[in-house]
Image (tube, rainbow, N blue to C red):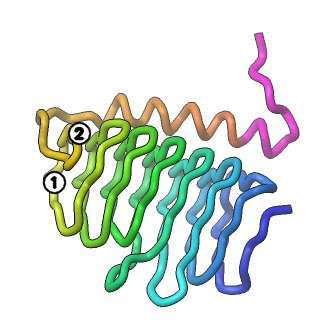
Amino acid sequence: MPHIGPQVTLDNPAFIHETAQLQGKVYVGPDVSIWTYAVTRSEQYEIRIGARTNIQDFVMIHEGHDTPTLIGEDCSITHHVTLHGCEIGDCCLIGINATIMDGAKIGANSIVAGNAIVTEGAEFPENSIIGGVPAKLLATRDNRESNLENVQLYYSLAVRYAMGEDRLED
């Protein structure tokens, strides 16, 4: 059974893995999936995870020094990502091992490349492709459809895992 603290609000998530740790003021929206060893912790502000978003293995989400962490709907927060007091717009994909720091804002339909470090207070508009250390705008294009494909895959996996099935059918 995952650790789900008394201030966590679960609004009909699709799946929460037994190793997940959710602590403090955290809202988990409808059809959200939270995977292996993911951690959320919010002692002062809040963490909000929008509908159908997937929080993948080993993700760490924490509030910032002066800011909540807000994640939009239909996002993929991939393996080993750290989100710290930032805002992620709807339909974003945050790549493996990326870090997004306090006060940073990622516009809707954006992609943050794996291993990118988005520094404190950085802001990127909708439809951005962001990468590097420190992260910068690499290109602009509407990534909504490709990002939704990943969300739909993770939702289908979440439904299977919730039924005890951890393998796709042939």
User: Is 101 rendered above or below residue 76?
Assistant: below
**Residue, x 77% and y 36% (percent of image)?**
160
Spot occupied by residue 127 in the image (x, y as percentages of width and height): 19, 42
Task: Tell me: 112 left or right of 58.
Answer: left
Task: Tell me: 165 left or right of 97.
Answer: right
Q: Is residue 114 magenta?
A: no
Lower position in the chain sequence, tag 1 or tag 2: 1
Callout 1 crowding tier (Cα within 10 Å): few <14, some 14–19, many ≥20: some
**SS assignment at label 1:** strand
Q: Write down the residue under mark 1.
A: 124
Mark linked to residue 131: 2
User: Is 65 rendered above or below residue 101?
Assistant: below
Spot occupied by residue 144 in the image (x, y as percentages of width and height): 30, 37
When asked about the image quadrant of residue 38, the answer is bottom right
**Residue, x 27% and y 44% (percent of image)?**
109
**Residue, x 56% and y 64% (percent of image)?**
29
**Quadrant into which the N terminus falls:** bottom right
Q: Which residues are magenta?
A: 159-170
**Quadrant into which the C terminus falls:** top right
